[in-house]
Image (tube, coloured by chain):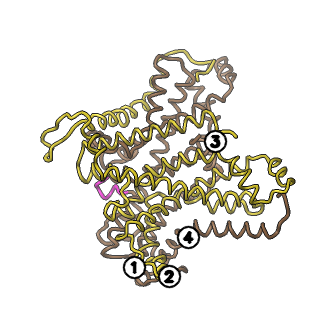
Amino acid sequence: MIENRPILTVFTHIIMILGVALIALPIWITFVAASHDEIRMLQAPIPMLPGSHFVENFKQALFGAGLSGDQTPVWRMLLNSLAMALMISFGKISISLISAFAIVYFKFPFRMGFFWMIFITLMLPVEVRILPTFEVVANLGMLNSYWGLSIPLIASATATFMFRQVFLTIPDEMLESARIDGAGPMRFFWDILLPLSRTNIAALFVILFIFGWNQYLWPLLITTDTDMTTIVMSIKQMLESAEQSPQWNIIMMTALLAMLPPILVVVGMQKLFVQGLTETDK
Amino acid sequence: MLKRVHFPSSPLPYLLVAPQIIITLVFFMWPASQALYQSLLVEDAFGLSTEFVWFENFTYLASDSHYLDAFWRTAIFSFLVAFMSMSVALILAGFADRVIKGATVYRTLLIWPYAVAPVLAGALWVFMFNPTLGIFPYLLDMIGVNWNHYLNGTQAMGLVIAAAAWKQVAYNFLFYLAAMQSIPRGVIEAAAIDGAGPVKRFTTIIIPLVSPTTFFLLVINLVYAFFETFGIIHVVTQGGPAASTTILVYKVFNDGFVGLDLGGSAAQSVVLMVIVIVMTMVQFKYVEKKVEY
């Protein structure tokens, strides 16, 4: 610190604590709501301190029938979300790795044409082409399947760019010596490129897992079968059913369960998360 | 672009790019061209016949007051979301930059909203502002404000903006903090020796020096507010009351899937695509030559 001003330091901490409180307030209220019984959550004002029904609500939300009229149990939705998030992140990482490898390490006709084709996908977020993409998926018979949930989202310009950048920084001598030792292209890819880009892959995985888990519009469109509902989607239906049977304790517990996995990933892998964020957006 | 040492041409590179290219063609190129094509068609009310009408859908959009309202509403919404989340993040980062003890703890506690899905962020805020149960309507009632975002369009807009901005603070905070920590300490020390206090240094040195980050974040936040806030709107207000929170992305969805106006929805998609392309180009231009002062 440049100057010693104890009052300013105290003030700084006060502001930071206020900021944290402001940011954490919504989740605190959610947590409190998830820890009371149903009756208490119908009396205004709602409590601000946690109650004693947390474990009970947890069990009811996770294994019970959930809310009335909603047959899919929450654990099933969590599994659907997990499958979708993992398929999207692994899919994106693998196809981006191999296409970046082809573009950087091979000289072949239409190389730049392919590169620009991938680049353009960057400009077409799913929100702007929902109807025609939905038609394609419907015609391919991929509605209500994990394939339909994940494959249309796994083309990735940003990931391809990032791996291209990483590969370009790898010294040429690596390839030269690998070739002298008699390694073919795929051997070089597996034994040298992949190990060298390990941290980049991990960092990207953190970002993509969150991206995949938090998908909303796409699953909403292509899943009509309640068995395929993802946890993030289910919140909307629960809020709608809250008009008739406001079981806020269960709704908020489900919301808590829905945001917990990505939050754990961000907090647990903070360093990789920050690296992934700054790399993919630059 | 290409490595100086590389492999010769063979079928292998084609196989390697094939998965990415096939997915791009099937799920990106083809739907985008369909959107372009459909935007030139008009379908009758029963879906029996379609007519090629050139740019009629677009001229209709340009004269449709609902669409133009949605356009301006989106602009105001996006700028307010960007402004609020960026200014809160800037101030917090400014203070966090001064913290020595516990800096990582604060960072951890501030970044997690990034992981919350927009629709969940919306659900949390709609619960806090529930007119009969929520804590904020209860507090607002004490000072004589009657809160009901189901009836009051301005309040609904305010709620949607707050939820969208809240979620984005984490992201902006990380980038601002990184930018501030990369400012050479010598510059700050020199200003301190010249007698500039903390506030003066923040406004005249730190803010100008992080302006490249500000510009970058502005583009990112506008794109976020334009496209990724769909979930928030869908869960909090569903575009209402009386279309007062219908932004462009929500309107494309609503007109296409609920209203089944295929041509009109496709024309709106094309307008959105143009907006994304312009924004992406601005962003790339920035990446190429950073704004320097």
Q: Which mark is residue A199?
A: 3
User: Pointer 2: what residue?
Assistant: B143
User: How packed is label 1: few (under 14 Cα within 10 Å), some, or many (20 or more)?
Assistant: some
**Camera-side mark, 1 or 4:** 1
Which chain can be seen in brown?
A: A
Q: Are marks 1 and 4 on the same chain?
A: no
Q: Nearer the viewer, residue A62 or A106?
A: A106
- Specify which label sits upstream in the sequence, 4 or 3: 4
Q: Residues in magenta?
A: A222-229
Q: Colour of chain B?
A: yellow
Residue B31 located left or right of residue A259: left
Secondary structure type for disc 1: loop
Q: Dividing the image into 4 quarters, which one contains the C terminus of chain B?
A: top right
Q: Position of residue A124 (x, y in %)?
A: 41, 39
User: How packed is label 2: few (under 14 Cα within 10 Å), some, or many (20 or more)?
Assistant: few
Label 4 to label 2: alpha-carbon separation:
21 Å
The chain to which mark 4 is attached is A
**Camera-side mark, 1 or 3:** 1
